[in-house]
Amino acid sequence: MNKVSIKDIAKKAGVSITTVSIVLNGNGTERKISPSKIKKIMDVAAELNYRPNQQAKSLRTGKTYTLGLIVDDISNFFFSHLAKTVEEEADKFGYTVMFCSSENDEGKSRNVLGTLLNKQMDGYLIAPTSGMQQEINQLVQENKPLVLVDRFFQNSSASYVALDNYKGTFDSVTHLAKQGYSKIAIVTNDSEQIQLQERFEGYKTALRKHKIPFVPEYVKKIPFKFSAQKTVREIESFVAANPDVDAILFTSNNLGIPGLEGLRNLNKKVGNDIAVICFDDNDHFRLASPSITVISQPIRAIGKNALKILLDQIDKKELKQVKSVLLPNLIVRESTPVKASIIPAVKSKATDNTAKGKK
């Protein structure tokens, strides 16, 4: 089969070769070509299965049309869905994405960054490890198109898209307090990463607001590098050592899933013996019985915003810092019912009100 050219597209669409070239390079709207004509050209290109000569395109534009994405673990629910969003959106603009996992390891993160830099990517989306600030600052100084995702460095001028993590845990503790829980523990990672620090601060501030004592023994910090099974054992030991805890907040799905396993191993019934909230949502939490209350992150919005900022940097060469902070959503499910000890009081009040209504 002969390779389809823009001349073939122009002939079938009934337009000039120049018009086809402008549209396929993504400049149709800017050059005031009508939406109907742009659609017709794109439809014909798809019908003829047109594939641009990437090498020629790169020589013409000075771009490689490749982007690098570095995350902690591509198999993690949050990062896999983030990567999928970035890949889908990038494809709309003719970009391909190379994914790398740092495994939250300082050495590996530097190695994978070096690999991507050697491949002359047009831009970089990075969920940095806590020790990457020097490398990130260097990229900014070199005017490399760059956007940080999920976390950032406070003293860096790199653009970022992140979540209001403080609000996520603050709202969670507030919900638990309103449900009658007062011995609220938190299980987090032993890390200086900003998103985890913000989640911890939100937890502590909400305790103060609701006049719930902060108990250091109710805080469990688990190293990132622990295996899932070791994490399960750590959580089992933590819960067993604090039998009076009536609610637990897990600050990531990587902690929440082994946390639920640990509670099951201890014969702790979620929703009855202990309330549970997890940061991040996934099918496991939604389909569990009882279903798990979560702090949901707008993953698609994070990915789309980050890519838009990055492409703006690439196309406009404007590298001014952009700070995009999105809001979490507390999804209340069955794992955080009204605490059993206050239900009689609630029923009694309802009974009193009913009695008054009969008088």
Image (cartoon, rainbow, N blue to C red):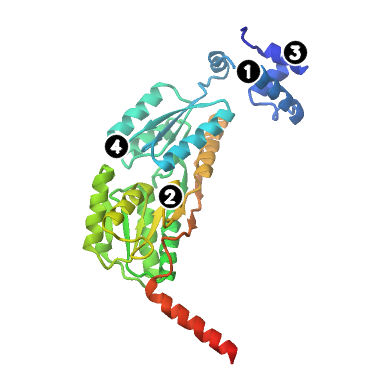
Q: Position of residue 163 (x, y in %)?
A: 46, 49
Amino acid type, residue under disc 3 in the picture: Lys
Alpha carbon of mark 4 to alpha carbon of mark 3: how far? 54 Å
Q: Are marks 2 and 3 in contact (CB under 8 Å)?
A: no
Image quadrant containing the N terminus: top right
In the image, 29 versus 289, the foreground residue is: 289
Vertical order, 35 against 21 (above or below) = below
Q: Would you name the residue on which mark 3 appears? A: 11
Q: Earlier in the sequence, mark 4 or mark 2?
A: 4
Alpha carbon of mark 1 to alpha carbon of mark 4: how far? 42 Å
Classed neighbour count for the residue bearing mark 3: other residues with Cα under 10 Å, few (<14), some (14–19), many (≥20): few
Whether residue 215 sits left or right of residue 310 in the image: it is left
Alpha carbon of mark 1 to alpha carbon of mark 2: how far? 39 Å
Q: Would you name the residue on which mark 4 appears? A: 105
Alpha carbon of mark 2 to alpha carbon of mark 3: how far? 51 Å
Vertical order, 337 against 193 (above or below) = below
Amino acid type, residue under disc 2 in the picture: Asp
The residue lying at 74 percent from left, 30 percent from top is: 35
Residue that sits furthest to the top in the current view: 2
Of the numbered discs in the image, which one, if any, rests on residue 37? none
Q: Quadrant of residue 116?
A: top left
Q: Would you name the residue on which mark 1 appears? A: 49
The residue lying at 37 percent from left, 50 percent from top is: 252
Q: Would you name the residue on which mark 2 appears? A: 280
Image quadrant containing the C terminus: bottom right
